[in-house]
Amino acid sequence: MNWIRNFAHRPGDTDDLTFHKRLILIIALSCCLCGLIWSALYVKVFGIGLTMALPLVFVVVVGVTIVISARLGDHRPLVYAQLLCITWISALIEWSIGGVAASGLVIAWSFLGPIGALIFLPMRQAAAWMAMFMLIVAISVGLEPALPGAPQAVTEGTSALFFLMNVGASSMVVFAAAAWFVHTIQREQARSESLLANMLPGSIARRLKGNSAAIADAHNEVSVLFADIVGFTTYSATVTAGELVDELNELFSQFDALAASFGAEKIKTIGDAYMAAAGVPDHRSDHAEALADFALALQAAAAELRRRDGERFTLRVGIHSGPAIAGVIGSSRYAFDLWGDTVNTASRMESHGQADRIQVSERTAELLRGGFVLTAPGAVEIKGKGQMQAFFLEGRSPAEL
């Protein structure tokens, strides 16, 4: 119903706050229904009197507070009214009937006070509600002989019915609350694991969950790829921020899917550049071949997409193979990353390459020979490295197709 979904709603309410508002309303309405049932039962057993009136007091107080909370847009008055009534009126009913046995353990309903406090209030306040419940138990058990008035006459059958209704119904509510807690924990755990899986490779995520220390592994042989969108900085000045992000998201989402398909590991995006690797975090002997196939697929995917101005995306790609350090450092915003000269050289292969070409280092070319077509542009002057022999990756060898 809309009035339940919109109970005490205010603009800007978070999803969790909206859920808590709906939950306390559903609990309050359910308890009001129970109050009417209990009042009717007490009329039949005890007649009109205090015992019958107490559940109606609960219904009236909680019902009025529902209206107040709805008008204020604040569910907290209903929370406190519900907790106070369920805790104390249940105890008053027991005392009016004459004790634990005669009332069929109606005080079990009072335990819902601290349970509700755990759901809706801070832990310190929940502890105070638990202390209040223990005080009520002490009064009921330890001081029962001193309670004013004699127990009302209740048959064994009626007492058994009271016990079944009170213990059964209150236990169902406690079970529902516990199930809600468990479901919430499982949902949040699944969400956290999903986020961690999206941020980190699976094997790294599992290690990180079991150990908070920094993770760093030395790999003797990996391949690293950098892909940069040619002319994107100039193009970005011609579109809005939203359009820019949408286009990058569409392109890089395709890159992510291709990485998963070819067994490459996305490392990160740096502006309009995309970094990936193969052979990390798990070793594979064909790391160069896997990344070469991935690079060719990137070029093909980029060529099929069109920018908003009608032009196609153009990539400049560089690959280098060699040793690298891989791991996760820091204590927040975890990110899997690579370090070492291999990473720097792969970046230089890209930045000193040509548009629409995949430039690979001599070391990567050695690993690809026989399975791929390579052409040599000759020695390339690489910043910080001097002259290096580089090659253009043209595609798979015909024999491999």
Image (cartoon, helix red, strand yellow):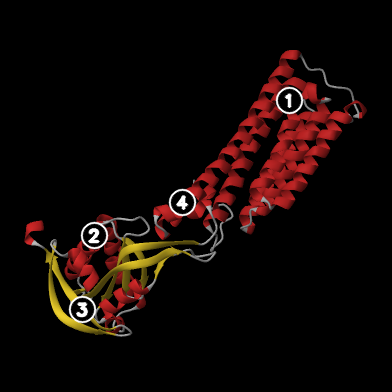
Name the amino acid type tagged 1: Tyr
User: Which residue is located at x 7 percent, y 61 percent?
Assistant: 398
| Residue closer to the observer: 297 or 94 | 297
Give the quadrant of residue 308: bottom left
Tag 3 residue: 389
Q: Where is residue 358 shown, x and y percent of the image?
A: 20, 73
Q: What amino acid type is highlighted by mark number 3?
A: Gln
Q: Which residue is mark 2?
A: 290
Residue 324 position in % (x across, y down): 37, 67
Q: Amino acid at mark 4?
A: Arg
Based on the displayed image, in which of its 4 quarters is residue 400 positioned? bottom left
Marks 3 and 2 close (CB-CB < 8 Å): no
Distance from disc 2 to disc 4, alpha carbons, whole Å, reads 24 Å
Q: Spatial distance from mark 1 to mark 4, Cα to Cα?
A: 58 Å
Q: CA distance from mark 1 to mark 3?
A: 95 Å
The residue beneath circle 1 is 42
For this orientation, the residue located farthest to the top is 156
- In the rendered structure, the answer to whether residue 382 lies left or right of residue 13 reads left
- Which mark, residue 233? none
| Residue at figure coordinates x 41%, y 63% from the top left | 218
